[in-house]
Amino acid sequence: MKVAIIGGTGYGAVELLRFLHIHPYAEVKTIISHSSAGKSLTDFYPHTDGFITGSLETFDVKALSEQVDFAFFAAPPGVSRDLLPRLTEAGIRCVDLAGDFRLKEAAVYKEWYQQDAASEELLEKAVYGLPELNAEQISKADFVANPGCYPTATLLGLLPAVHNGLINPASIIIDAKSGLSGAGKTPTAISHYSEINENIKAYKLGSHKHIPEIEQALAGISGSQHPVSLTTQLVPMTRGIMATMYADLTTDKTASELLESYENYYETHPFVRLRSLGEWPATKEVAASNFCDIGLHLDERTNRLTIVSVIDNLVKGAAGQAIQNMNMMQGWEQTAGLWTLPVYP
Amino acid sequence: MKVAIIGGTGYGAVELLRFLHIHPYAEVKTIISHSSAGKSLTDFYPHTDGFITGSLETFDVKALSEQVDFAFFAAPPGVSRDLLPRLTEAGIRCVDLAGDFRLKEAAVYKEWYQQDAASEELLEKAVYGLPELNAEQISKADFVANPGCYPTATLLGLLPAVHNGLINPASIIIDAKSGLSGAGKTPTAISHYSEINENIKAYKLGSHKHIPEIEQALAGISGSQHPVSLTTQLVPMTRGIMATMYADLTTDKTASELLESYENYYETHPFVRLRSLGEWPATKEVAASNFCDIGLHLDERTNRLTIVSVIDNLVKGAAGQAIQNMNMMQGWEQTAGLWTLPVYP
Amino acid sequence: MKVAIIGGTGYGAVELLRFLHIHPYAEVKTIISHSSAGKSLTDFYPHTDGFITGSLETFDVKALSEQVDFAFFAAPPGVSRDLLPRLTEAGIRCVDLAGDFRLKEAAVYKEWYQQDAASEELLEKAVYGLPELNAEQISKADFVANPGCYPTATLLGLLPAVHNGLINPASIIIDAKSGLSGAGKTPTAISHYSEINENIKAYKLGSHKHIPEIEQALAGISGSQHPVSLTTQLVPMTRGIMATMYADLTTDKTASELLESYENYYETHPFVRLRSLGEWPATKEVAASNFCDIGLHLDERTNRLTIVSVIDNLVKGAAGQAIQNMNMMQGWEQTAGLWTLPVYP
Amino acid sequence: MKVAIIGGTGYGAVELLRFLHIHPYAEVKTIISHSSAGKSLTDFYPHTDGFITGSLETFDVKALSEQVDFAFFAAPPGVSRDLLPRLTEAGIRCVDLAGDFRLKEAAVYKEWYQQDAASEELLEKAVYGLPELNAEQISKADFVANPGCYPTATLLGLLPAVHNGLINPASIIIDAKSGLSGAGKTPTAISHYSEINENIKAYKLGSHKHIPEIEQALAGISGSQHPVSLTTQLVPMTRGIMATMYADLTTDKTASELLESYENYYETHPFVRLRSLGEWPATKEVAASNFCDIGLHLDERTNRLTIVSVIDNLVKGAAGQAIQNMNMMQGWEQTAGLWTLPVYP
């Protein structure tokens, strides 16, 4: 199958390229970049030398519909909202890596993203592409909204506990730490090397766009709507997110039983790995891979569950999960092109 | 005043040396290292070249009592427990940077440190040296137990809220991130560069020795004992701790009023600085200095207070605070030798 | 083809595993670790979870000869010297990632490695496995000595110039910088995080074991023996080597003509990529891949050629090149299992 | 003495502030920032909270001449060229941290800086402020051009050898590595965290502005003009430069004798420290301090001298050296305000 990558000069695009290059069934046919059409991706990314032929192209529905059956949107917010429907109308299946279709309610989108949402019809139609939550819907979808990086790490850490009613959803606190690649390729004061090296920086407390995304997904599982506390913090590394989560237990299960609940939930989900009790994952243990690794700690003194969940924000938090969604939409095995070992150390 | 540093080859010792070198009233007379006596500190730390005369010496109470009036213990756990009383008996005032005298109850010490505690009499006599909490006691103390690095960041973040009853102490969750220098100078698997670079690693959930230290101090303020949740995480940097804390509010104060409570509490404490609402400190903003910077976030949606507190673990979390304690014990201004700008960037 | 990895708990082993996992013709059958036999590799490397079955095993020639046709030695110096001949005698082809068979003269080995060399017969028989230099010999070899990481970056940068007589071999100066993973997995003072972070450190000037290896290879090309200056420096990163090389030109070729010489030399070598004039590679542009990227600068003011050559020390400098050698020894395409995009950023 | 800092929002300015704060004789009276006048420095640098009163001000010769006797220019290239003469005419002594007055020949300046030079009269009058080279001239100067960061590390490494004719100046090769803070505070693609972390990047080969500055100074010592090879490379750290230098020996002195020459040369220069033979400095060993540490290696096999020289680019390579120059211009001890231990680790 031929695929297109739209928004070709960001980090999401080069990660898509890296995995699609070893994908058994899909092949990148064209890379679209409005602002850099005519140039080669290799001008921006010398590391792609030898893997790229042809130039970056402009967005042209007709040309795309003749060339590809599938498209990934890895563009800034607002782009897929306008362009994606034109592709789906032309029969091209899509995964959107931006946030334009993740929230079901236009008003909520507008409040947090501070721009207009896509049409309600499209928001309704979009499937939230967390494979470990929505497998069946994804497999039938025409287009999928790929989850945000923080929500992916967070939700995978919380799903079994919320689904099985093991914790009080009103008590959930998420302390999340991210490497800098999540901030994208455009230089800003916050991503300036001398400012972030040897530094941890908390940012956007109470205003991060991923808050409503997490709350919407949790409400869908628990059946009741609760606000969550999310603190996002930048740590001096390029890749990786660790979400450390805290919640009050509503069960008297032992730590082993809690772990067993998680193991059961993820039995059929190849990309979630659980650590033994007394061990917790580190972000490096999933680097450059599509895994989400999770460790639990039952704190009997406080009757709280602490959950440590790690992903590579550019892979399971973006490009890898997008390909996983494509695999499911196409009826291929989830792991096609993605079953690679993390790069360690 | 002449001072001794005992445990001279660790990071605590070289930080003491750095600040004492610019101290107006105190001067390092001797540096003690049992294992390296006879060698020069410069053999271990070329950066001290030009600032050191003489060799590392053995521990000798008589010699010390003739040479110095004050001693800092920057030795591994268990050393000061045995040696510090011999100095205080000889009339030498001491600050202990290890944990041997921080916990008041021997049984609690033994449970968490897994070795025997100092005598109950000494534990009783030791003053817990958090200047922003125990100023008066410190000023009268013969010897002071310098707080741990995580407890310093945590307690300074919580003190005004707990003292003024603004939060429910039973609800406190502490998510703490530290640079690697807190792990000391001895190479271990966890501090191996290739393992920790580009990595965040959670460790010792539920078993960190700083848990009882935090709980003891909070109980002293609130008057009631509550367990806290503490998660400690290593992030790829050398210096700095960020403690992000969450607690349920028990007040309907506005964010401005909460900040005002903090400002009032710290009005006379020069080393705590508060950020304006909507801003939170980064660890780099206190690097190599004795400051603790704090930012607040009132999350109205969850009715929780989020507190972000940062220190340099080797300074306010160790050597700087030790000198601050000395200053107070000697009746000098707290800031003597310590009023320097952070090293930025 | 079934293969064995001997020395299973080092970084070389896990990199072999990562690439062999996606190799079309070879498969890891057993991993040998003398010191950790009976344990699982996952105990040491949680990131391998799901990719490993069975335990680490002891070294047993008979068992190996029944199970595998090929073996990689990724063990400390001195191990392959003793064990590798026993495998080749049993008909198992081998690549040795250590330095035991790289130097042709036993006396030189003893001088630089300060231990006894392998037998002269074996040293004679060993093929130095730099594919871009010794392709034909490698394709006929029973066992191959995989080059060191610094020599790989250095020689690939110098080969076309020395081969074509463009530079004076007596004038070669090599300034090499390496990430820490080259120092292996065992914690030492030099690899302690707090010591190497925010630091560059020069080490082993005039005594690095890779000096005679570089000189031997250059002498083989130029036909005359010359000492080289090599300075090795550790920089705060995990992966990557940059070798910056300087040599006096012996030609009046233009920069474009020099580049053309390089392009001609490497035309049939897929893993060496050349940058356009005015551009030089960065280590990140080859991260986690088997590429060596090279950029030239003709300094007309000094009549010197500056060559910038980068590799990932664990891949082209170790495991990747070992697999490339295996591919050539087996008559497979060089790129089998190795044609993957670098991980960027 | 009251001083002004002009160009108040860059890293040079905050480093000046840090050292001037502990200076015994000088005090910052005003900080000038054209673009940010009216704002507080604390808005840009929260770490200065408590150390700053008043706002950033506009440049006004009259106001300055009433307020201060001394000024530091820490502004972008071209600013001091135009403004500095107006201050010196008003009787204010100046140190310029930019490159506007470093090169004696206007044509050379124009070639390398690609903008017009200051007047020949001013270029003539400017004293090149490398204290270890030009002590006497500096002590009599009205204004001083503070050396660049690479030239400082390079020249201090070469001075004794060139001065004593120990090496052939035509053979000098400089391989320099720098942290990112030398690139300043403005975010650019090259200083974007995700691009430079885990990376070494060579840049500006053959075109770096510091090349003519080094050559001019060396010509002044050796009496003959020779081009040098300089390669500049960015390494993933914030502070620090290591210049590794290579030159052919013109003497048969032993390594000990060479070291002795260096020791003699620097006997009266407190900020240069020499390592024993067999040891070489690391950048961290001078971090946040005004030291330049140097180690030598006599390579008898190649008859070359290798010199490893390290500085903190923001201190001895900028603000610290500027204050050292001020001290000398004022007839104070060189070390005033600067005799502090490096921050380690």
Image: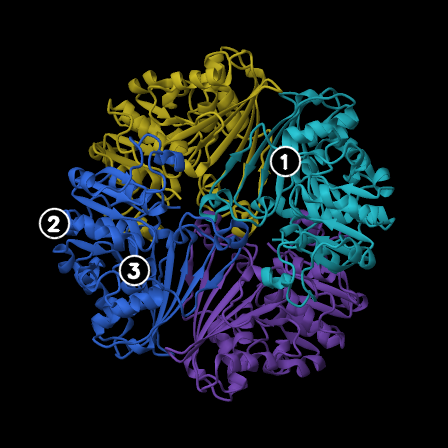
Chain colours: A purple, B blue, C cyan, D yellow
Q: Circle 2 is placed at which residue position?
A: B331
Q: Residue furthest bottom?
A: A223
Q: Circle 3 is placed at which residue position?
A: B152
Q: Do marks 2 and 3 both belong to one polypeptide chain?
A: yes
Query: Which residue is rendered at x = 60% and y = 81% of the image?
Result: A265
Left or right position of B40 against A259? left
Tell me which chain the residue with mark 1 is part of: C
Q: Quadrant of residue C24?
A: bottom right
Q: Callout 1: helix, strand or loop?
A: strand
Left or right position of B209 against A32? left
Quarter of the image with the N terminus of chain B is top left
Q: Callout 2: helix, strand or loop?
A: loop
Query: Which residue is rendered at x = 67% and y = 53% of the image?
Result: C13
Tell me which chain the residue with mark 3 is part of: B
User: What's the distance in space between the residues labelled 3 and 1, CA to CA?
Assistant: 45 Å
Q: Quadrant of residue A330?
A: bottom right
Say few, some or many: other residues with alpha carbon within 10 Å of mark 2 (under 14 / 14 to 19 / 20 or more): few
Up the image or down, D48 lies above or below B52; here it is below
For badge 3, the amino acid type reads Thr
Left or right position of D268 against A75? left
For badge 1, the amino acid type reads Ala
Q: Circle 1 is placed at which residue position?
A: C243
Up the image or down, A145 lies above or below D38; here it is below
Residue C109 position within the rendered picture, expressed as x and y whole percent measured from the top left? 68, 31
Instruction: Answer yes or no: is residue A294 visible.
Output: yes
Sequence-first tag of 2 and 3: 3
Residue C29 position within the rendered picture, expressed as x and y whole percent measured from the top left? 76, 60
Q: Do marks 3 and 1 both belong to one polypeptide chain?
A: no
Q: Nearer the viewer, mark 1 or mark 2?
A: 2
